Image (spheres, rainbow, N blue to C red):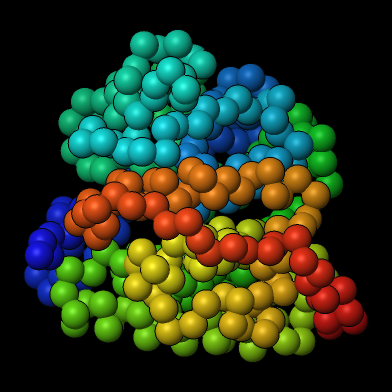
Amino acid sequence: MSTAAPFPKESDAKGSFVRQESAFRDRVTADGSSGFPAEAGRYHLYVSLACPWAHRTLIVRKLKGLEDAISLSVVDPLRDELGWRFGPDFPDPLDHGWTHLSQAYAATDPDFAGRVTVPTLWDTRTGRVVNNESADILVMLNEEWNAFATHPDLDLYPEALRPEIDELNAWVYDDINNGVYKSGFASSQEAYEAAVHPLFAALERADERLATRRYLFGAEPTLADWRLFTTLVRFDAVYVGHFKCNLKRIVDFPNLSGYLRDLHQQPGIAETVDFDHIKRHYYLTHGSINPTGIVPAGPILDLDAPHGREGVGA
């Protein structure tokens, strides 16, 4: 049986998954002071519907009403040896003639040798990647394109809450968002045990927090909620089985389960969730984890069921 890590360059001597740092961290700004001014039609977002990091940017783009200002490409859910790819069903509308997203990275930095990731924010004016860090892109989408947004008054990262949001995001990212990957991509029992138990401790912590408030910071969702949502919505369908995160399911948590349905039922969100892409990507791409390539039929998830969260924290 193979114990090879899915991404060997991101595995340490103990078999633990160590995620690479994002390589491109330039910023788009409303005033143009960064050298990348916010403009309608200038920037293009490359995403995968399977990837939780890309999914969050898709959600914020939709909530802010930036569909007409920032164009979008969806890559094939199946990665190959060259990474995220385009094809007849998943074309690059910018018509670069690329077959893989890696060609955008090579055009930006010919010496780039890391793993190509989504989301990727591309500048059509300068012909280069601006940013491939989802946390940065979320904040930019929230505040830098307001002049072109349908919902400019929606603020998902309120100034007064930023220190608390950042503090919560730190442990949610490490133990939950990345925790499922540290569990699933572990190539030793020791590494798996070191990741899976903190993951479920953090889920219990989040569940307890949501017992007294509808969302993580009160009556309205923030960026913190959408960062957590994209992991939760994949959890029972993929992470429980494929990544061996099976101490409990999200449906077994009294507050997280309703919270997940509540967020999924927010206007426009369900249409950003594609379980076909999600399941085919994970089960068909990670050959060392699922060598048979069988995509499971279940589970059956009723995310449209009443969530019962309306009065929490009122």
Q: Considering only vertical position in the picture, is 5 above or below 306?
A: above
Residue at x-position 35% and y-position 73%: 244
Residue farthest to the front? 297
Q: On the image, which quarter does residue 16 sit in?
A: bottom left
Q: Nearer the viewer, residue 301 or 99?
A: 301
Q: Residue 190 location in percent, x, y?
A: 19, 82
Q: Considering only vertical position in the picture, is 164 above or below 300?
A: below
Identify the image quadrant of the C terminus.
Answer: bottom right
Q: Residue 160 location in percent, x, y?
A: 73, 67
Q: Residue 196 location in percent, x, y?
A: 35, 80
Q: On the image, which quarter does residue 5 sit in?
A: bottom left
Count the labels in the image: 0
Q: On the image, which quarter does residue 289 sit in?
A: bottom left
Residue at x-position 76% and y-position 87%: 212
Q: Residue 213 location in percent, x, y?
A: 77, 81
Q: Answer left or right for 30 relative to 146.
A: left
Residue at x-position 60% and y-position 42%: 58
Q: Nearer the viewer, residue 266 or 13?
A: 266
Q: Answer left or right for 15 relative to 132.
A: left
Residue at x-position 56% and y-position 35%: 28
Q: Considering only vertical position in the picture, is 167 above or below 155?
A: below
Q: Nearer the viewer, residue 112 or 115?
A: 115
| Residue 97 seen anywhere in this rendered image of the structure | yes
Identify the image quadrant of the N terminus.
Answer: bottom left
| Residue 173 seen anywhere in this rendered image of the structure | no
